[in-house]
Image (spheres, rainbow, N blue to C red):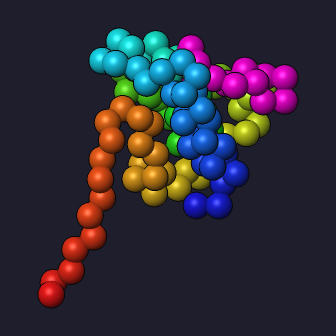
Amino acid sequence: MDNIFFGFVFTTFRHAFMKVGIPNGALGRSSFFNSVGYDIGGLFYNFSELENGILRGNKKAPGQFSVPFADRDPRKKLVLEKADPRIHFALNCGAVEYEIHCTSKK
């Protein structure tokens, strides 16, 4: 996964958690991901747009009825043409902290 936005999104999630706090509950997470974000090149991107719009190839977020970026949206130029399926494992989004344990057959 060699997308510069993955590192940016991962780091900005952590930064936002320190600045505004980690959201609680489904409503808190929805509000956080749809309202907190960053200005990139003069255009604002909330976390839902960064994650689902750019990293996941402009796919609808769970519970949403439309894609993050319409055809004429100038932010659409940053959308990955082909999303890397490993993104689902790489992004945690702070919703729940998971530990990954490696095991062997030994």
- Which residues are drawn in magenta? 35-48
Q: Position of residue 81 (x, y in %)?
A: 64, 48
* Magenta span includes 37: yes
Looking at this view, name the residue that lies furthest to the bottom. Answer: 106
Residue 100 found in image quarter: bottom left
Is residue 57 visible from the viewing direction of this image?
no
**Up-down relation of residue 87 to residue 104 (above or below):** above
Q: Answer left or right for 54 relative to 100.
A: right
**Up-down relation of residue 102 to residue 105 (above or below):** above
**Up-down relation of residue 81 to residue 52 (above or below):** below
Q: Position of residue 18 (x, y in %)?
A: 54, 28
Looking at this view, name the residue that lies furthest to the right. Answer: 42
Q: Position of residue 60 (x, y in %)?
A: 47, 29
- Residue drawn at x 15%, y 87% is 106
Closer to the camera in the image, 103 or 34: 103
Q: Answer left or right for 79 relative to 90.
A: right
Q: Position of residue 90 (x, y in %)?
A: 46, 52
- Residue drawn at x 48%, y 21% is 21
- Residue drawn at x 70%, y 51% is 4
* Magenta span includes 92: no
**Up-down relation of residue 58 to residue 26 (above or below):** below
